[in-house]
Image: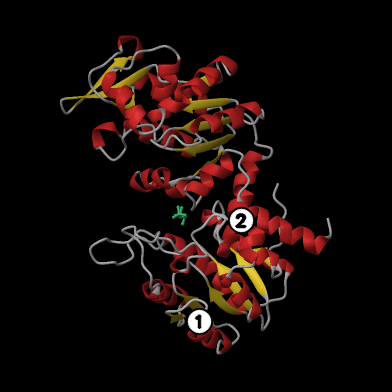
Amino acid sequence: MARFLTIDDLDFSGKTVILRPDFNVPIDPNTGEIVDDSRIREHAETIKELSTKGARIVILAHQGRPGERDYLESLRKHAERLSGILGFKVDYVDDLVGESALEAISKLKPGGVLLLKNVRSHPDEGREAPPEEHARSEIVSKLSRVADIFVLDGFSVAHRSHASVVGFAYTLPSCAGRVMERELKALDRVLEKPEKPFVCILGGAKSEKSTSMIDYFLGKGLADYILTGGLIGQLLLLASGLDLGSVNVKVLEKRGFLKFRNEAVEILRRYNGMVKTPVDVAVDMNGRRIELSVKDLPSEYPIMDIGRRTIDMYKQIISNARSILVSGPLGVYEDERFIEGTSEIYRAAALSGAYCIGGGGDTVAALEKLGLRDRFSYVSLAGGAFIEYISGSRLPGVEALEIAYRRVKHV
Ligand code: 3PG
């Protein structure tokens, strides 16, 4: 369990606080408008509380990565959206560490909120570097001089060892904001001592961490069953010796799964019976959903979903679970013909009565599409950070909070 200070542990009255939320939100590429402000809404809770406590709040945030389509150097639209959510004006300055920024900070009144320019506009930021090095960066050293406390609220950026995430914990008293606190508590509930049986549902199309995640959950004795679908399900079928057909193997190769083939073979050998793979699949046969037993593979048609018998088998296991973690859809949920596996399995998880958590961009999008988001016990705001954390990786942002905790508690 990560140990860190929270907002309850520090006195914020009249203090200048550097707050690092994650305001990285979907942007309409044509208009530059914010499409979904869920993250801003969640962080607004922390901001409101700090404001009520009389803090002067300076927000450091990012939108996209320089050079990519969703990158915005100015965060003025984010400030406007935040003003609307908070119900009072949030100041914005198109500067980060220059005179205008420092002047705007000095003019903040207790309870006031100021958003600075995209922190990734500064070369110090988008670079992975050790926290001690980031503590000496221009961003951290200049802003630390005019601030009293650092609050890290963006769990979803905590996997980045960037200046605004890890640097301030070395220079200022630092604590977790409410979003960070909530995310860590919810995830630690299943990662520390999950109520058993604990079932993980793994799917999706992202290869990174998929085999190491399985190894972590089963190797540590956390999970009882891993139910697989999506491309990780297909990789495991391949590792079991099945020929999926060249069209499907090509997809696995393109999405970076094939390089984990040996790990997949080892997982099947080591955790025999605990890792469940599809017994049937749905393929796209010239626009029609056709179900095939895996015994009838290879197929010249692309595998798009798990089949009916697999759904029933997985639902049976889910019905006995006390804890469930969901990462990734079971099939191509964006296409109505192939949403069935994801729909039925997510619904079974949501209605099982187990403590049920999910996270990652596609999982959240699928939950939204199926109207199930509110039926899960907890849905993480994070994408990459969620995957890293549940795979057992130490997140630099969380480690920075732990360092700040140890400094105060002398442990
Ligand atoms: C996210 O959206 O996952 C975070 O904001 C991190 O963004 P990044 O992948 O560009 O670092």
Colour scheme employed for the rendering of this structure: secondary structure
Q: CA distance from mark 1 to mark 2?
A: 25 Å
Residue at the far right: name it. 410
Label 1 residue SS: loop
Reply above or below: 48 against 286.
below
Which one is earlier in the sequence, the residue at label 1 or at label 2?
1
Which mark, residue 98?
Answer: 1
Between disc 1 and disc 2, the foreground one is 1
Number of residues whose C-alpha sits closer than 10 Å to that of mark 1, classed few (under 14), some (14–19) or many (20 or more): few
Q: Is residue 53 visible?
A: no
Which quadrant holds residue 35?
Answer: bottom left
For mark 2, what is the residue? 397
Q: What is the quadrant of the C terminus in the image?
A: bottom right
Q: Is residue 374 visible?
A: yes
**Mark 2: amino acid:** Gly
Residue displayed at 45% across by 33% down: 348
**Mark 1: amino acid:** Gly
Label 2 near label 1: C-beta < 8 Å? no
The answer to whether the beta carbon of the residue marked 1 is less than 8 Å from any atom of ligand 1 is no
